[in-house]
Image (cartoon, rainbow, N blue to C red):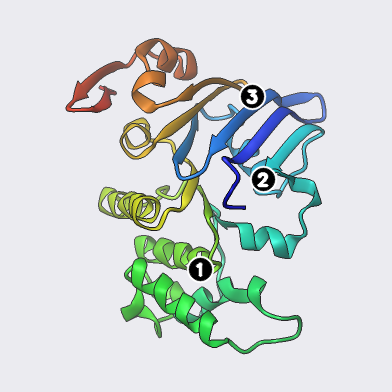
Amino acid sequence: MSEQKYVYEVRDLYFAYGEHKVLQEVSFSLQKGKITTLIGANGCGKSTLFQLLTRNQKPESGEIKLYGENLRDIKLKDLAKKSAIVHQYHTVLEDLSVEKLVSYGRIPHRKAGSFRLSEKDREKVEWAMKVTRITKYRNRPVSKLSGGQRQRVWIAMALAQDTELLLLDEPTTYLDVRYQIQILQLVSKLNQEYGLTIVMVLHDINQALYYSDEILAMKNGKIIGQGMPKEVLTEELLEEVYGVRLHVFTVGEKSFISAV
């Protein structure tokens, strides 16, 4: 797996709900070791594409390869050892503790019928809680935490899976700006210090510009731009994607937009 240059290789992807074409002619490759962000207006197909990349949906035609292997051919347990996913919506039992939830990330690594954590399992759980700074909440019910704290717990559970790839579906949604920044700083740390490849969906264009190595811009179920944020997110492309003219300006080496 480590010898593969690309994490995902997607070719001629097509998906529809009845007669409504959601994705068509979608092709791209994502390199290892980068933070790639999917952006686009509501209804452009980015959430559906995320569901296809995580195998929660199956394409009607086309091909998705993960580390060179056809995604549809990978056993679920093996897939959980290759990629970890944090979805946008979560449900959890009222009294489930933080540590217990994080430990569920080790399920793909356990032998069939085994419910006990091995020494390695415990090490990975401790590491995941430490990296996400939730160790002090280990015995607290997840349901009693704030939104930002809960999001770090779900990320910790994903990290406990010990994969090279982390997929995040709108990780900052419903969080106030302080927690948004904390989560995205954590994402950056996971990429830069621990070498994780990150694929995420974001609505905030400035956050995508600042925290991403690569952007996939979508419109009407197609990829209309891919590359480095400052090269892809021009005023012209943003107007095509969102239907409104946004001024792009640069501070240092980073680009930002003015949305007022």
Name the residue at 71% across, 62% down.
78
Residue 242 picture location, percent across and down = 45, 19
Q: Which corner quadrant of the image does residue 20 belong to?
A: top right
Nearer to the camera, 168 or 68: 68
Residue type at tag 2:
Leu
Question: Going by the picture, which residue comes out furthest to the left?
Answer: 252
Nearer to the camera, 116 or 246: 116
Contact flag, marks 1 and 3 (Cβ < 8 Å): no
Q: Which residue is mark 2?
A: 66
SS class, disc 3: loop
Residue type at tag 3:
Gly
Decide: few, some or many residues near mark 3? Use Cα within 10 Å; few <14, some 14-19, many ≥20.
Answer: many
**Circle number at residue 157:** 1
Q: Which residue is mark 3?
A: 221
Name the residue at 57% across, 52% down.
2
Q: Is residue 188 left or right of residue 59?
A: left
Q: Is residue 111 left or right of residue 160?
A: right
Contact flag, marks 2 and 1 (Cβ < 8 Å): no
Sooner in the amino-acid sequence: mark 1 or mark 3:
1
SS class, disc 1: helix
Name the residue at 42% across, 61% down.
151
Q: Is 2 rendered above or below residue 29?
A: below
SS class, disc 2: strand
State the separation of the CA atoms marked 3 and 2. Answer: 21 Å
